[in-house]
Image: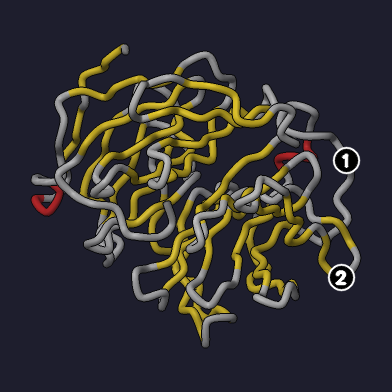
Amino acid sequence: MEKVRARFEVLDERFAKVGGDEWLERVFDGGRWTEGPAYVPAGRYLVFSDIPNDRVLRWDETTGAVGVLRAPADYANGRTLDRLGRLVSCEQGTRRVTRIEHDGSLTVLADRYRGNRFNSPNDVVEHSDGGIWFTDPSYGIDSDYEGIRAPSELDGCHVYRIGPAGEVDRVAGDFERPNGLAFSADESILYVGDSGRGHIRRFTVDGGAKLAGGEVFATCDAGTFDGLRLDTEGRVWAAAHDGLHCFAPDGGLLGKLHVPEVTSNLAFGGARRNHLFITATTSVYAIRLNINGAAYPS
């Protein structure tokens, strides 16, 4: 297993004790654009996508082996583990959100809004009320690299919610390229990255099903933001072109964990949720930290 020295850039003293291992472990290479990490504690493995190669892979924590979980995979991108331990995935090729049931069967949760197909669902989180929230930029229909080139059937790129009964609502419609998203621990705030504008916005969750506000929470100084996750202290971790950026709940940039490749997403896992997994261009990196990831999403 290749190791790369970990470099934590401390920009605020509150970030000083966040570090952990001296090394980033490269647990996988050979991808084209890795994405969508989700840790499955029951099996002690990480699931992630290699989108252009149209496959979903699985890294086994106990053996270090990597195998193909699904191929072809409908150009799957982001995913989350729901509260019943089922994988919910965004498929760019089929332009839908799906769930793998415990028996291995596939359930389509949503593929249209008011009769029109989505652009290419990108990333997804679950609310405790059972609602599924996801972003829908156009990356999967812009070319044949990460999906299937096609015209959009909608009036833009938006954020949607699938209700417990299967109803689909558009909850935010003023994005250029909505991407990563994550709830605060008490689910009172939803953070949504706009990779088209290079910032993260912060919304107040109104009654569990609607959003209010939407002010800019943070702006990227290295490329643009992609996937988002929170830790138990309410800090927001965001994938960017030079690694992971860590923000305080007040929006201040605390520091960065630099990664050798452009990062796309991240997930906390392991028995204590202090094992951080990072998808980055061709590779997946792992590092144990002194802090713990929030319970959801995985």
Residue 74, numbered label: none
- Residue 20 occupies which quadrant of the picture? top left
Image-quadrant location for residue 287: top left
- Residue 284 locus on image (x, y percent): 42, 26
Element class at badge 1: loop
Q: Which residue is mark 2?
A: 114
At label 1, counting other C-alpha atoms closer than 10 Å, the crowd grade (few under 14, some 14-19, many 20 or more) is few
Count of labels in the image = 2
Q: Amino acid at mark 1?
A: Ala
Q: Nearer the viewer, mark 2 or mark 1?
A: 2
Crowdedness near tag 2: few (<14), some (14–19) or many (≥20) residues, C-alpha within 10 Å:
few
Horizontal side of 209 relative to 227 (left or right) equals right
Rendered view: 79 above or below 149 = below
Q: Amino acid at mark 2?
A: Arg
- The residue positioned 26% from the left and 46% from the top of the image is 271
The residue that appears at 34% across and 69% down in the rendered structure is 185
Furthest-bottom residue in this view: 207
| Left or right: 18 as drawn, with respect to 104 | left
Residue 142, position as x, y percentages in the image: 78, 37
- Residue depicted at 74% across the width and 28% down the height: 72
Q: Nearer the viewer, residue 171 or 75?
A: 75
Instruction: Tell me if residue 116 comes above or below residue 123 in the rendering.
Output: below
Who comes first in sequence, dot 2 or dot 1? Answer: 2
The answer to whether 171 appears left or right of 225 in the picture is right
Q: Which mark is residue 150?
A: 1
Residue 10 in picture, x, y percent from top left: 15, 41
Q: Residue at x 51, y 70 (%)?
A: 127
